[in-house]
Amino acid sequence: MSSYNRNPKGKNQHKYDEVFELRLEAALRGYHCELKTSNHEISELLKADYGIDKSASTVKRRRKDLGLTGGAATMKKMAKSDVVQSVLGKIDKDPAKRMGDSVILPRKIVWEIMQEHDKDSFALREPTAKKVFRVAKYPIGIHQRWSCNGHDKMYKIGYPIWAIVDDAAGKILKAWEFQGMPIQTTTDCGSETTLLYGIVNTLRDTYHSDIDSIEVPPHVYLRSVHNISVEWQWLRLRLDFGDNCVIAFNDGVAKGYYNSQDPEQYELSQWLWPRFIQAGLDEYAAFRNSVKMRKESDKPGPSAMSCNTAFSLPEKWGGRNCLLPVDVDVIAQMKRDMSGDALIAFSTPEFAARAQIVYDSLHIQKLTEENIWHVFLAMLPVVFPQRVQSA
């Protein structure tokens, strides 16, 4: 046997790809924020979502290197005082007492800490809704049906919300990402839905006339209590985000930070608050999409998995991808004909550009309920310098 070592330093021929490693790290951190701790499931999701082929053992090793641990492992390396402070710190930032955090802790531990330090919050979470008769759904796949609806609970501070949820997976969607349409959309009978009815019928007739519109209508109107895939999101949104948002907005009014009768204050508020609310909605959607459903052995469709998993891996519950392709250039032109981004914007493009420059100059890392009115007051004299001159 030769004593010559052809590779004395033990280096293999794989080159370090910094872009790939950063992409992998971002994906693993994203799954961690979604409270995913199964290495096998993460391995499958990496393949489905990013085209990254990593074994469960490799995923386990990389998660360990990044310090991404589950609840039991977190408890072993965190001092009891740090665990308590992590929970209490989140409670202090949550006036409505309903949010969670990105640190994965056992549910029992969080419950015990809240029972000891904030027992009254449990009374705020008691469900009081009446039972509504339901029948089982038998989904055939994702994009079979999009459940759509508007949320009016934040109209009280002037900001309407609209959401689309995949009926099979229960995932909150960013519809523009898919470059297609579902087989069917559903809404309640609100007056704002008539335009959507016309659009989806036109698209189906134009691009998929082979689907029988009598047997499978492009759009169906339902009572709100039956359009449940999107309707059930509203309670959780109000409890997790909406109530706190309204409290923060009204607090600024009560303290004299904001006067809606002042045109300049109103214009700046219409730019700043939608920015804050959209960021909060994105965080809410990311969290709700990552929550694991309870296991229901007799339920048709997905169970015992998160909405993200059910959507990315429909074959795990016997589903398929039902997305119908459309010409996105035609959709873009339709949007332009309907006023484009101005249709859903709260500010004019000219004012938005001016406000963005001022906002960037403040180097704000993140808008929060605690700092948004301070940012508002800092921006106001810079966006409207004539206020300082007149004063």
Image: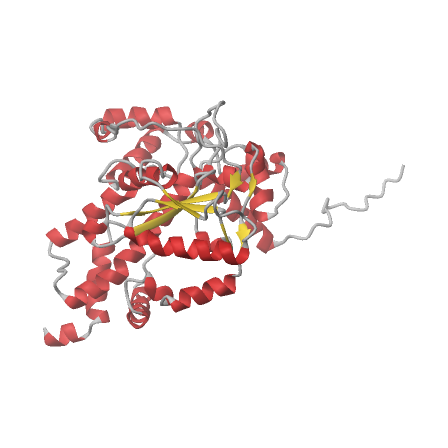
Relative to the observer, which residue lies in front, 218 or 11? 218
* 298 w.r.t. 275: above or below: above
Q: Judge left or right: residue 365 versus residue 249.
A: right
Instruction: Give percent across and percent down for residue 128.
Output: 24, 28
Q: Judge left or right: residue 197 versus residue 123.
A: right
Q: Judge left or right: residue 8 versus residue 263.
A: right
- Which quarter of the figure is the C terminus placed in? bottom left
Q: Is residue 66 visible?
A: no
Instruction: Give percent across and percent down for residue 142.
Output: 51, 42
Q: Is residue 207 visible?
A: yes
* 158 w.r.t. 351: above or below: above
Q: Judge left or right: residue 179 versus residue 384.
A: right
- Which quarter of the figure is the N terminus placed in? top right
Instruction: Give percent across and percent down for residue 121.
Output: 22, 30
Residue 62 falls in image quadrant: top right
Relative to the observer, which residue lies in front, 90 or 270? 270
Q: State the residue at coordinates (22%, 60%).
A: 269
